[in-house]
Image: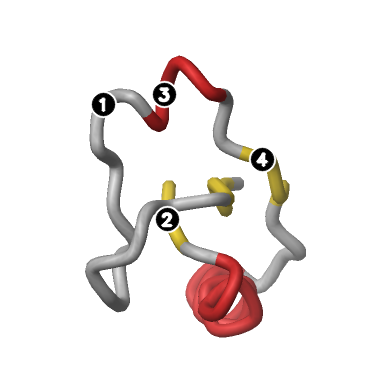
């Protein structure tokens, strides 16, 4: 599981990941070279700031 999210939706992404996997996920900040790829939040159209994964 890998969710891209903005700062506004990071809590929601963490909750979704815990609900689906039953374990606390890894929270990483998106690297600058990755943001140049126009990665957007899973929940809105803002630029993704974090990657929530397991």
Labelled pair 3, 1 in contact (Cβ < 8 Å): yes
Sequence-first disc among 1 and 2: 2
Determine the residue located farthest toward the top in the rendered image: 33
Disc 4 target residue: 29
In 3D space, how far apart are the residues under numbered discs 3 and 4 (Cα atoms)?
10 Å
Tell me: residue 52, above or below residue 35: below
**Which one is closest to the eye, mark 1 or mark 2?**
1
Labelled pair 4, 2 in contact (Cβ < 8 Å): no
Q: Secondary structure at mark 1?
A: loop
In 3D space, how far apart are the residues under numbered discs 4 and 1 (Cα atoms)?
15 Å
In 3D space, how far apart are the residues under numbered discs 3 and 1 (Cα atoms)?
6 Å
In 3D space, how far apart are the residues under numbered discs 1 and 2 (Cα atoms)?
15 Å
Q: Quadrant of residue 7?
A: bottom right
Disc 2 target residue: 3
In 3D space, how far apart are the residues under numbered discs 3 and 2 (Cα atoms)?
14 Å
Sequence-first disc among 3 and 2: 2
**Which one is closest to the eye, mark 3 or mark 2?**
3
Residue 12 badge? none
Q: Position of residue 12 (x, y in %)?
A: 55, 84
Q: Secondary structure at mark 2?
A: strand
Disc 3 target residue: 34
Disc 1 target residue: 37
């Amino acid at each position: 599981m890998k969710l891209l999210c903005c700062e506004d939706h990071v809590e929601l992404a963490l909750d979704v990941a815990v609900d689906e996997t039953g374990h606390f996920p890894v929270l990483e900040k998106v690297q600058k070279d990755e943001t140049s790829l126009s990665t957007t939040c899973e929940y809105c159209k803002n630029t993704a700031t974090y990657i929530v994964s397991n």
